[in-house]
């Protein structure tokens, strides 16, 4: 099965811009995915004070977005690909790699650090880079510079050491 030609970058970029504009028009304060864990804890009724808030006001559309991302990933992985994805080394990112020390480090420690960093920075890369920069927020510019610097360090120093 031949895959369709992907959308050009300028169509995808304009679509993201329209989504951000639409979200601001309907009153959504931010665009990103990292706050969904907090929304899920609020739905579950956590006893911690930081999880006692009206998640329906800020989180309903955000949870819908995250659900759509999961559904879209499932559809793409099962019906829209002709070959296995090759974006990550199988020695680090696979079910068999989870039983090795480099695999545990990459998936568990790396996943924790990404989640911790996103909460510490007040949002994820998509939230800061798309929503924060489009509304000229200085903290988002600092966060995006930090995300890119961290990505470059991991790509050029940590990943070759692990492989």
Image (cartoon, grey):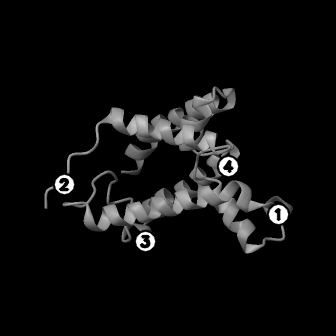
| Cα–Cα span, label 3 and label 4 | 28 Å
Q: Is residue 125 visible?
A: no
Label number found at residue 52: 1
Counting residues from the N terminus, which is met first, the one under dot 1 or under dot 4? 1
Residue indicated by mark 3: 99
Q: Which mark is residue 145?
A: none
Distance between the alpha carbons at the discs numbered 1 and 2:
45 Å
Looking at the image, is mark 2 or mark 3 earlier in the sequence? 2
Circle 2 sits on which residue? 3
User: How much space separates mark 4 and mark 2, taking CA atoms?
Assistant: 36 Å
Compare marks 4 and 2 and give the one earlier in the sequence: 2
Q: Residue furthest bottom?
A: 44
Q: Which is more foreground, mark 3 or mark 4?
A: 4
**Labelled disc at residue 119:** 4
Within the image, what quadrant is residue 140 found in? Answer: top right
For mark 2, does the 10 Å Cα neighbourhood hold few (<14), some (14 to 19), or many (20 or more) residues?
few
């Amino acid at each position: 099965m031949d895959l369709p030609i992907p959308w050009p970058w300028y169509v995808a970029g304009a679509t993201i811009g329209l989504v951000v504009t639409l979200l601001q028009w309907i009153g959504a304060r931010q665009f990103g995915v990292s706050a969904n864990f907090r929304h899920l804890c609020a739905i579950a009724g956590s006893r911690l004070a930081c999880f006692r808030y009206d998640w329906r006001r800020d989180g309903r559309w955000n949870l819908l977005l995250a659900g759509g991302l999961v559904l879209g990933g499932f559809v793409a992985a099962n019906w829209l690909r002709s070959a296995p994805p090759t974006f990550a080394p199988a020695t680090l990112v696979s079910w068999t790699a989870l039983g090795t020390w480099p695999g545990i480090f990459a998936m568990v420690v790396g996943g924790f650090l990404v989640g911790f960093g996103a909460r510490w920075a007040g949002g994820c890369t998509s939230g800061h880079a798309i929503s924060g920069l489009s509304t000229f927020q200085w903290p988002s510019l600092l966060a995006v510079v930090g995300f890119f610097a961290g990505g470059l360090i991991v790509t050029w120093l940590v990943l070759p050491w692990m492989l």
